[in-house]
Image (spheres, grey):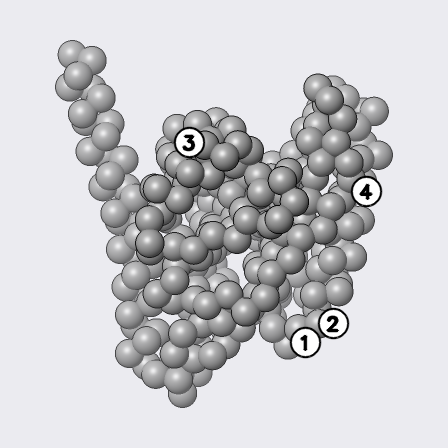
Amino acid sequence: MRFVTAAVTAVATALTVAAVASADQTTDRTTAAAGPSAAATQISLGTHNSHHGDGSFESFAGVIGWQEVNDPEDRRKLNRRLGGEYATFYPADGPAKAVPISWRTGRFTKVGSGSVRTHGGEAKVTPARYVNWVVLRIHGTGKRFVFVNTHFISGAWSGHPERQARWNRHYQVLKDKVAQLKRSHPGKPIFVAGDFNRRKAMAMPDPLRHVAVRGVSGVPIDQMYAPTNVSHTKVSRLPRWGSDHHAYKMFATF
């Protein structure tokens, strides 16, 4: 019976991932067919906390921000799972590699990237935390956008108030970096995603706003932010795929 249940679960997971990937690839083909003169381009963006690499790294969006890809083996697992269809930005600083960003190489080319530390680490409390970003160019249209990924310290708003100073420092660095990216890339859409470890929609530099999750009341700790001057869907909650966090995905058109 265990074998049958496992087989059914594996098939269901494969079908879910295939459906998600197919939807995104269909969008890619439609955009490519329109050619460089197309008035709008649709992209898919996602975020998933892998729970220390326990989750399966699924190809559920065109651009994905990951969290808790902590160890070299986690990163090898990510690379094996995504294969040559994706490239991944791992910053040079060791702890920053825990929040990488992956993108479909058939759709995007990285033209810029960076990483900034938000605060230091402390044994048995937290690793050093980072804000990572990539600047991507869309094939066929040449349009560019910025995708930011991050992971805040846990427990600051749920049992460990002594951690709030670190959380607040992280938040300030994130806002400052988004503002700086706006100045460096004027007119280019900026999207922010990650595990905020706080159930509250946070203020971001204009025109970014929190994007609500379809069918979910309140604000989950895994969050996505998009510009109000860019057309976008609500965020969809996807399976956990072996993690203790759901994956999340949205579409944006610009």
Q: Amino acid at mark 4?
A: Arg
Residue in front for this viewpoint, 53 or 80: 80
Q: CA distance from mark 3 to mark 2?
A: 36 Å
The local secondary structure at tag 4 comes to helix
Mark sitting on residue 183: 2
Residue 216, can we see it? no
Residue 109 vertical position relative to residue 90 in the rendered view, above or below: below
Q: Is residue 234 left or right of residue 220?
A: left
The residue pinned by badge 1 equals 186
Q: Earlier in the sequence, mark 1 or mark 4?
A: 4
Q: Earlier in the sequence, mark 4 or mark 2?
A: 4
Q: Give the image location of residue 226, x and y in percent.
A: 59, 59
The residue pinned by badge 3 equals 55
Mark 1 surroundings: few (<14), some (14-19) or many (≥20) residues within 10 A? few
Q: Amino acid at mark 3?
A: Gly
- Mark 1 touches mark 2? (CB < 8 Å): yes
Name the residue located 26 percent from the left edge and 55 percent from the top edge.
22
Q: Give the image location of residue 159, x and y in percent.
A: 74, 20
Residue in front for this viewpoint, 244 or 118: 118
Q: Amino acid at mark 2?
A: Arg
Q: CA distance from mark 3 to mark 4?
A: 29 Å
Residue 202 vertical position relative to residue 136 in the rendered view, above or below: above
Q: CA distance from mark 1 to mark 2?
A: 6 Å
Q: Quadrant of the N terminus?
A: top left
Name the residue located 51 percent from the left edge and 65 percent from the top edge.
110
The local secondary structure at tag 1 comes to loop
Q: Give the image location of residue 61, x and y in percent.
A: 40, 53
The local secondary structure at tag 3 comes to loop
